[in-house]
Structures are given as C-alpha cells and as structure tokens.
Amino acid sequence: MIDRAQLKQELLEELVAHSPAAAMRGLRRWPGGPLSLVHLHVLTVLDIDGPLPMRVLAESLDVSQASATGIVDRMEQRGLVTRQRDGEDRRVVKVALTDAGRAMVNSLAADRREKLTLVIDELTDEELAGFLLGARAMRRGRERLHAHLAAEHGDRT
C-alpha cells in the first residue's frame, strides 16, 4: 500500500531542495548588472499589470511611497523603467517598463528556459515522461487551489 504522507513528504523535500541562494547568485551576475529581488519584483509587477501609479506600485511592493520612489529612481537610471504623467490627472505619476525593462523580463524568462532545458536534457525518457505527468498534475492542483481560494475570498479573477 502507498504511504501518501511519506510520498508527500519526499515530494516536498525534492521541490524545496533548490537553494534560493543559488538564484540570488545568478541575479548578482546578471549581464545587465546586478538585479535585486526588489527590482525583479518591480519588473514582474509592471510586466503583469502594465504602467502603475507610484502609489499602487508602492502598495504592491509593501513599501512607503518614498521608498518606492528611491527604487524607481535607481531603476530609471539603469533605463529599466520610466515615469509618465497620467493623461487624465497630471498629478499622478505612472511607472512603466521601458524597452530595456521589457527586454530584461524577456531575458530572465529565456535564461530560465535555457537552464531548465539543460536539466531536462539530463533526464532519461522514462524520467521525462514521469516528470511531465507530475508537472501537469501540479498545474492542475495549483489551478484547483487558486479557484478554491478565489471562491473563498469572493474573487472572480
């Protein structure tokens, strides 16, 4: 008989085995210069949500508007983001990705895909088939969990 608790524990150990420190080392050696987690967060938020008012970006980062301004200043100096006045309310400053910022997001995704390809290439055909089955199951589980949480919180997204 399958010991579900033991299987879950072993799977969790495998999933958390990757070290966040390794990811941070990769960000520090990024070709366009070191990239902090905060900068990565800003790039990701702007990639998903598009241009945002500084206040909304600060809330998303869980920092003060003054801190968000400093973060955006540094990213603007690197050419990753730009500030734009809102067309309807000139008092509102929106932060948007520049072409260089979008290229950075695309580069991060391409780099991740390239590294995953190298790992996948090391798998046997049987491991590859099993991993695909497991990855699809994880996606379905994640989708069910998100749907459950959205229903719990009354979200429709």
Image (cartoon, rainbow, N blue to C red):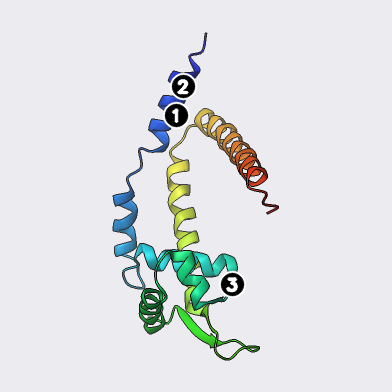
Q: Quadrant of residue 40?
A: bottom left
Q: Amino acid at mark 3?
A: Gly
Disc 2 crowd, CA 10 A, few/some/many (<14, 14-19, 20+): few
Determine crowd level at label 1: few under 14, some 14-19, many 20+ residues with C-alpha closer than 10 A.
few
Q: CA distance from mark 3 to mark 1?
A: 36 Å
Residue at 46% of width from left, 35% of height from top? 123
CB contact under 8 Å: marks 2 and 1: yes
Residue beneath label 1, please?
Answer: 11
| Badge number at residue 7 | 2
How far from the left and from the top, in percent, is residue 36?
A: 34, 65
Question: Residue 135, located in which quarter of the rendered image?
Answer: top right
x, y (%) of residue 124?
48, 32
Q: Position of residue 88 (x, y in %)?
A: 65, 88
Q: Give the mark, 3 or 1, whose residue is nearer the N terminus.
A: 1
Label 2 to label 3: alpha-carbon separation: 41 Å
- Numbered disc in front, either 3 or 1: 3
